[in-house]
Image (tube, rainbow, N blue to C red):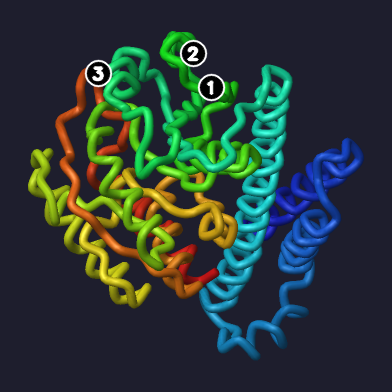
Amino acid sequence: MGLRIFGAIVAVLLAAFAIARYRKGQLRRGESLLIAAVSTALTVAAVAPNLLDPVLSALGFEAGRERRIIGLLVLSNLFTLALVFRGFTRDDTLSTEIGDLVDYVALRRLLDEGHPELRGAAAVVIPAYNEADNLPSVLTEMPDEVGGLRVQPIVIADGSTDVTETTARNLGATVIRRDLRRGSGAAVRLGYKAALEGGARVIVTLDADGQHDPGEMEQLVKPLLSNDVDMVQGSRILGDFEVESKARKYGVRVFALLLTLLGSTRITDPSTGYRAMTASALKRLDLRQDQFYVSELILDASRKGMNVVEVPITIRARASGTSKKPTTFRYAWGFSKAIMRTWLR
């Protein structure tokens, strides 16, 4: 009896919660209906539990001892999971809408300041979060032209709280200031959009921490201009790199094998941020990941039949400061989720 009374109290509280939130416009109709269903089921279980026997019996929970309670718990958990997934979907939608608004404001600010003329140039997109100490070496080492194309760096100050923006401007880079940090993938997408709108012929990406050598940019861009190549990936495996940890070293190999199998395109380095692609290839890509975007980019390019090649590059130790990457386990988990989302999409 005590459990039935408790269930009735929970049902009343759920109903009151749903009514209050719905009146304030904080609950959608679908969510309200799910809560109402759970509340009604709890009420029936408390007042007349025998009415639920046909439903529970059909699901294999025959009346007797604890079976009915177990059946009710299973059903309530299913409804709870539905509400949780509904909440996740809503949070993702709100996050995307807020991110799109922030990106719109950032691009409008760039337009007001004077969008750079990039027609026929090589735009170099550099996502940067608090990299004021490393940007001077990255930008000063950058060549003035590659493959006969003028080089124009575009630094995306992704919610930076230091003087990243000022430093980049003083060194001649185009700067896109985004007031909300969303991640390297979202920052790169914003830079890609600006590069395409400016009329760039080739778009290069590299990191702002000094790990990539700007002097190697020529070998990434050259295949795009002389061959039928859509995208060139830099590969530390084919070149040289300083091992951060054995876990990351072997993780690179495992994910390289996985992406090669899923994308039917041989990849040796699945996580490098150093690449170049033509504007026509970039326009065909459908990029959505705010983080761990490299796997999405490789899989989408492979699925669309693009010619993707790798060239050797050197990965150096971070020039200064601490890495913005998550721990090895979190990085592997996030990278795996990005692969699965892209593959299922």
Among the 4 quarters of the image, the one containing residue 319: top left
Quick one: quadrant of the C terminus? bottom right
The percent coordinates of residue 147 (x first, y second) are: 36, 44
Q: Is residue 311 above or below residue 129?
A: below
Q: Is residue 342 visible?
A: yes
Q: Which residue is located at x 51 percent, y 60 percent?
A: 281
Residue position for label 2 = 169
Does label 2 or label 3 sit earlier along the sequence? 2
- For residue 228, the mark is none
Residue position for label 1 = 175
Q: Nearer the viewer, residue 242 or 60?
A: 242
Question: Is residue 165 left or right of 77 when viewed as pictured?
Answer: left
The percent coordinates of residue 117 (x first, y second) are: 61, 31
Question: Is residue 211 left or right of 8 when viewed as pictured?
Answer: left
Question: Is residue 237 left or right of 258 when viewed as pictured?
Answer: left
CB contact under 8 Å: marks 2 and 1: yes
Q: Nearer the viewer, residue 341 or 73?
A: 341
The percent coordinates of residue 286 (x first, y second) are: 57, 59
Residue position for label 3 = 321
Amino acid type, mark 2: Arg
Between the residue at mark 2 and the residue at mark 1, the CA separation in whole angstroms equals 6 Å
Number of dots carrying numbers: 3
Does label 1 or label 3 sit earlier along the sequence? 1
Does label 2 or label 1 sit earlier along the sequence? 2
Amino acid type, mark 3: Gly
Q: Secondary structure at mark 1?
A: strand
Quick one: quadrant of the N terminus? bottom right
Among the 4 quarters of the image, the one containing residue 256: bottom left
Between the residue at mark 2 and the residue at mark 3, the CA separation in whole angstroms equals 21 Å
The percent coordinates of residue 138 (x first, y second) are: 30, 24
Amino acid type, mark 1: Val
Q: Is residue 164 above or below residue 156?
A: above
